[in-house]
């Protein structure tokens, strides 16, 4: 058995390299199941892929799935989005944390396992990747300072909603200034008094050349920032007060433009809850 699994190497691998809890990297993937295949897609992802294609992999230590019912997708903006066409595309969002400093190690495994899953006919083909990217963590801004869950808890804490926000800097050399403005000047005020406990900020990295062909190469890797707002309330209850007009606020800075603001609620693992509310 050791020769088949090379398990004799596991102890050697565990003894070297970073092994902290910091979410140094993330996989953020928004997917649209093809019409008529919503339930089959959800069951495949819940029953197989979430585990075999994600959580069973080395260094991917936390994950959570989110869903956008039709009413939630109708809240999205801007109408013309560089991320989603149409802007309502992408019913399901999956978010995963990867240990800092382990991106390259994880990527070797994920490419290999996904090739194997395809060969074994364990990949649901009736879906479109709308926004899928591995991302490097840039910062986390907290509403309550040192009080409350940290970013490494975020995918396990029972948050009631999540807002995905994608912002493009005006030019590659402006992204650092955009990040600094968001973290030090804009987000602290936006979080104050809101139901959002934290915002994590990431920048996308290119996918490897030997990625699966159904996943398109990541766009705007030199200009884009991805924000995840973790909410203690259902996003529908706080949308008007806290999340409309985010494109106007960012545009006013002169540093970037909002390409997507999209609310989600958590799925209930092991169920098809919300599947009938997608269309």
Image: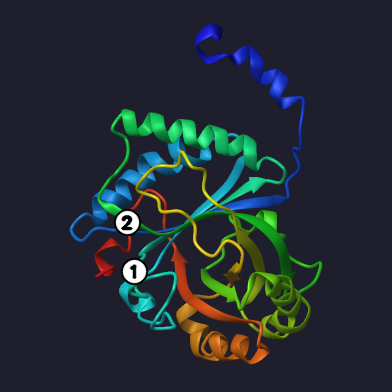
Answer yes or no: is residue 149 visible.
no
- Mark 1 element type: loop
Mark on residue 89? 1
Give left or right: position of 88 versus 1. left
- Mark 2 element type: strand
Which residue in the protein does label 2 denote? 128
Q: CA distance from mark 1 to mark 2?
A: 9 Å
Task: Where is residue 155? Give x, y as percent.
Answer: 58, 56
Task: Where is residue 28? Give x, y as percent.
Answer: 52, 56
Between discs 1 and 2, the one toward the N terminus: 1
Count of labels in the image:
2
Q: Nearer the viewer, residue 238 or 89?
A: 89
Residue farthest right in this picture: 146
Mark on residue 37? none
Kindly check if marks 1 and 2 are in contact, taking CB atoms under 8 A apart as contact. Answer: yes
- Report the residue at 54% width, 86% height from top: 247
Location of residue 14 with respect to 196 vertically, above or below? above
Mark 2 packing: few (<14 Cα in 10 Å), some, or many (20+)?
Answer: some
Which color scheme is applied?
A: rainbow
Mark 1 packing: few (<14 Cα in 10 Å), some, or many (20+)?
Answer: many
- Report the residue at 69% width, 75% height from top: 174
Image quadrant in which you'd find residue 82: bottom left
Location of residue 227 with respect to 188 vertically, above or below? above
């Amino acid at each position: 058995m050791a020769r088949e699994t090379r398990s004799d190497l596991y102890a050697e691998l565990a003894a070297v390299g970073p092994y902290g809890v910091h979410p140094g990297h993330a996989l953020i993937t928004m997917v649209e199941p093809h019409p008529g295949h919503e339930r089959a897609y959800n069951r495949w992802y819940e029953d197989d892929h979430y585990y075999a294609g994600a959580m069973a992999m080395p260094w991917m230590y936390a994950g959570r799935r989110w869903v956008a019912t039709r009413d939630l997708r109708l809240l999205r903006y801007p109408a013309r989005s560089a991320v989603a066409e149409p802007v309502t595309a992408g019913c399901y969002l999956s978010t995963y944390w990867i240990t800092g400093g382990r991106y390259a190690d994880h990527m070797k495994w994920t490419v290999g396992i996904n090739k194997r899953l395809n060969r074994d006919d364990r990949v649901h083909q009736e879906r479109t990747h709308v926004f899928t990217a591995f991302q490097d963590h840039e910062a986390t801004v907290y509403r309550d300072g040192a009080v409350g869950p940290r970013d490494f808890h975020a995918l396990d804490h029972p948050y009631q909603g999540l807002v995905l926000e994608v912002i493009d800097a005006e030019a590659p050399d402006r992204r650092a200034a955009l990040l600094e403005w968001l973290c030090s000047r804009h987000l602290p005020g936006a979080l104050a008094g809101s139901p959002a406990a934290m915002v994590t900020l990431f920048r996308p990295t290119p996918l490897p050349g030997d990625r699966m062909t159904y996943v398109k190469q990541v766009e705007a890797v030199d200009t884009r920032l991805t924000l995840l707002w973790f909410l203690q309330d259902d996003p529908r209850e706080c949308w008007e007060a806290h999340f409309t007009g985010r494109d106007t606020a960012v545009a006013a800075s002169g540093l970037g433009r909002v390409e997507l603001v999209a609310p989600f609620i958590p799925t209930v693992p092991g169920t098809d809850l919300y599947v009938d509310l997608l269309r």
